Image (spheres, grey):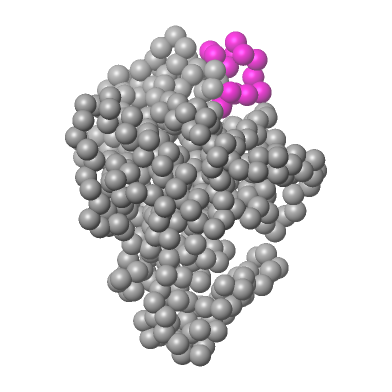
């Protein structure tokens, strides 16, 4: 932390932890959440007194006390006054510009608050682990998009793929992309070595062999055939990475219910998975998606993205953009209307007509219709589409309103 170029030090570990938690939030944090974060084992009255004292100490140690705004029910840090790397990193990751993704990955220095531990506050460590995973996921998403965006520049695509594997060595699709990139670039030896690395990692960590697609990429490289590097198939962007090496236990009835519901809905429909936090809704959805024969796109919701209209839908569409064959059933007119949400769409589909100039209210209506046409049109692909939206209780209002409208148009669709 710095102020006017000078470092700020907060001697007390708990005060630093509180400041980090407030700075990472996009808005106010309730006092109840903060007391639970640091004093979950204390009586409520004692926890509230501890929070009041800690806030007073924190404000006294900052260059400006108004950096921390204390209300009767919540506490916040005004982001117009306090700028954080996390905010900037998140903004850059969520744009449609490869140059922004490059800046974002250059900012990443490893896990968020690496080495910062609150031994007396397990709830804080639990929150910190969640933030580390969220930011790492954004970093890997940006690298994945940079690999695809740089297929015409093999050296750059290879560099980004290697960066990805330095963080997540189990990403078999990235290993496969590297094998193909090396082979397409004439480096047969590197392609074969990459396959061997992939085999060893999967066997050591998961006890599995590479997928047939990876083996096919290896055989192509081994035989010395050059093929143009192709984007990997669309892959879901899960909030929590599936533990594919661990079987899903005790969810047979739930999986059967999902399969039965999809069977009854021979065409399109909507299914809601609900339950208390931590019961395994995300893993259940992932397991069902893996077993299902549909093409899968996914979008994630988080408190930090509630101010971004249609955020999970943009995430899902970005997974499909590198695959032009999925979009053949969507008229260019509606593809052009998506440009405000997906600026990069013009890079993949040149000569699209620009959005029609209308009044703001009509423009929003056309954008919503374009989103509907996109998801309904993507099912022109031979397989139906399974759109998975995780943590829907954190979705923005625009997304929820759009889903309500979409539900009335699913009966004759394959979504």
The N terminus - image quarter? top left
- Look at 40% across and 73% down and name the residue there: 229
| Rendered view: 50 above or below 315 | above
Out of 183 and 71, give the one closest to the viewer. 183
| Count of residue discs | 0
Give the camera-side residue of 262 and 307: 262
Quadrant hosting residue 367: top left
Residue at (55% x, 66% y) in the render: 172
Residue depicted at x 38% and y 64%: 147
Q: Relative to residue 209, is residue 366 depicted above or below?
A: above
In the displayed structure, would residue 135 be above or below residue 203? above
**Residue 45: in magenta span:** yes
- Residue 162 x, y percent position in the rendering: 43, 68
Vertically, is 171 above or below 55?
below
Residue, far front = 412
In the visual, does 136 lie left or right of 77?
Answer: right
The C terminus sits in image quarter: top right
Question: Principal SS element in the magenta part?
Answer: helix
Q: Residue 271, can we see it?
A: yes
Give whichever of 136, 57 is nearer the camera.
Answer: 136
Left/right placement of residue 284 relative to residue 388 reads right
Percent of width and height locating residue 219:
55, 84
**Which residues, given as a range, are shown in magenta?**
36-50
Image location of residue 294, percent across then percent down? 59, 53
């Amino acid at each position: 932390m710095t102020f006017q170029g000078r470092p700020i030090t907060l001697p007390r570990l708990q005060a630093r932890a509180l400041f980090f938690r407030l700075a990472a939030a996009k808005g106010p944090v309730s006092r109840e959440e903060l007391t639970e974060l640091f004093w979950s084992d204390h009586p409520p009255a004692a926890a509230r007194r501890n929070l009041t004292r800690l806030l007073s100490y924190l404000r006294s140690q900052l260059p400006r006390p108004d950096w921390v705004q204390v209300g009767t029910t919540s506490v916040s840090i005004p982001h117009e006054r306090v700028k954080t790397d996390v905010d900037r990193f998140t903004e850059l990751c969520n744009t449609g510009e490869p140059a922004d993704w490059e800046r974002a990955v250059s900012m990443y220095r490893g896990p968020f608050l690496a080495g910062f531990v609150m031994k007396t506050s397990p709830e804080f460590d639990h929150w910190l682990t969640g933030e580390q995973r969220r930011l790492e996921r954004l970093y890997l998403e940006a690298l994945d998009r940079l690999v695809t965006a740089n297929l015409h520049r093999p050296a750059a695509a290879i560099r980004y793929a290697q960066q990805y594997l330095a963080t997540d060595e189990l990403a078999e699709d990235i290993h496969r992309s590297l094998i193909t990139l090396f082979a397409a670039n004439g480096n047969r030896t590197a392609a074969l070595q990459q396959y061997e690395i992939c085999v060893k990692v999967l066997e050591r960590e998961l006890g599995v062999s590479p997928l047939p697609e990876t083996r096919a990429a290896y055989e192509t490289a081994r035989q010395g055939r050059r093929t143009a590097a192709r984007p990997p198939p669309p892959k879901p962007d899960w909030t929590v990475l599936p533990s594919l090496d661990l079987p899903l236990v005790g969810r047979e009835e739930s999986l059967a219910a999902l399969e039965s519901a999809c069977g009854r809905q021979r065409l399109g429909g909507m299914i809601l998975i609900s339950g208390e936090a931590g019961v395994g809704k995300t893993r259940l959805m992932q397991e069902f998606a893996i077993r299902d024969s549909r093409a899968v796109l996914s979008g994630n919701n988080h408190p930090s993205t509630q101010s971004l209209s249609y955020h999970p839908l943009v995430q899902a569409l970005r997974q499909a953009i590198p695959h032009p064959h999925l979009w053949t059933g969507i008229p260019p007119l509606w593809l052009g209307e998506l440009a405000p949400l997906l600026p990069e769409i013009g890079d993949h589909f040149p000569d699209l007509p620009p959005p029609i100039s209308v009044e703001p209210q009509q423009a929003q209506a056309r954008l919503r219709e374009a989103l509907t046409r996109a998801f309904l049109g993507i099912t022109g692909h031979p397989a139906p589409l399974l759109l998975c939206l995780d943590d829907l209780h954190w979705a923005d209002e625009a997304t929820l309103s759009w889903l309500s409208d979409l539900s009335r148009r699913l009966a004759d669709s394959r979504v």
